[in-house]
Image: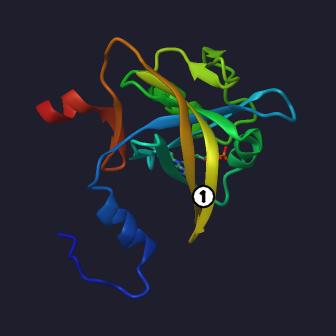
Amino acid sequence: MITSTVLRPVDPAHFRAVMRHLPTGVVAICATDPVTGTPSGLVVGSFQSLSLEPALVTFSVTHTSTSWPKISRAQQFSVNLLAEDQQSVCGALSSKSEDKFASINWHESSYGSPHITGSLGWIDCRVEQEIVAGDHLIVIAAVQEMTASDGGDPLVFHGGQLGGFRQRLAA
Ligand SMILES: Cc1cc2nc3c(=O)[nH]c(=O)nc-3n(C[C@H](O)[C@H](O)[C@H](O)COP(=O)(O)O)c2cc1C
């Protein structure tokens, strides 16, 4: 059993061991890099809505991300709410591959960002703030446009594993 003992400083492995009990949704943050004109993207589990009026969203991104600087300079990105059957999309976009989009079907939104086919929803956003917080940046963005698909189940990250919500309920 993992205890709730507070360690100072907190051991990163202990931090991960505790936080793995919290399930998160999985989204792909994507943009068209204005320098190369090619799509760039990464997966985050830290995405959430932040404010209703005005409509704001937030997520955190590690300082070591090589994709975020390309997305940040676009100032414009899409949030793709990944579906349970998009584990391969999650794998591609969380990799360090040179061409993450090689096996991904997508089209460009009216705001110029990639919308990945088969996602549960798409949110076009404009970057408002990037706040340094420890070894991550907190990104705050304004929602420009959002659409949901007709249905389907979300991709969930829990206990160090990717899976579906319903199969976990049944397990
Ligand atoms: C389920 C899941 C959740 C993740 N959540 C985050 C996150 O919230 N923030 C982050 O910076 N990276 C997160 N990552 C890691 C990035 O997707 C990815 O590994 C990394 O950004 C890829 O490298 P690049 O940015 O250099 O292309 C997550 C990965 C997975 C598989």
Choose top left, top right, bottom left or bottom right for residue 165.
top left
Which residue is most to the top? 150
- Dot 1 falls on a residue whose secondary structure is strand
Q: In the image, what residue type sits under mark 1?
A: Thr
* Ligand 1 neighbours mark 1 (CB distance < 8 Å): yes
Which residue is nearer to you in this view: 14 or 122? 122
Q: Find residue 8 and report its horizontal and vertical position in percent.
A: 39, 88
Q: Quadrant of the C terminus?
A: top left
| View extreme (bottom): residue | 8
Point out residue 34 in the picture as x, y percentages from the top left corner: 82, 33
Q: Residue at left 36%, top 72%?
A: 14
| Residue 171 is at least partly visible in this image | no
Residue at x-position 79% and y-position 27%: 38
Instruction: Report crowding for label 1: few under 14, some 14 to 19, many 20 or more residues within 10 A (C-alpha).
Output: some
Residue drawn at 20 percent across, 28 percent down = 166
Q: Quadrant of the N terminus?
A: bottom left
Q: Position of residue 120 (x, y in %)?
A: 40, 21
- Residue where numbered disc 1 is placed: 62
Q: Is residue 113 left or right of residue 3?
A: right
Image-quadrant location for residue 141: top right
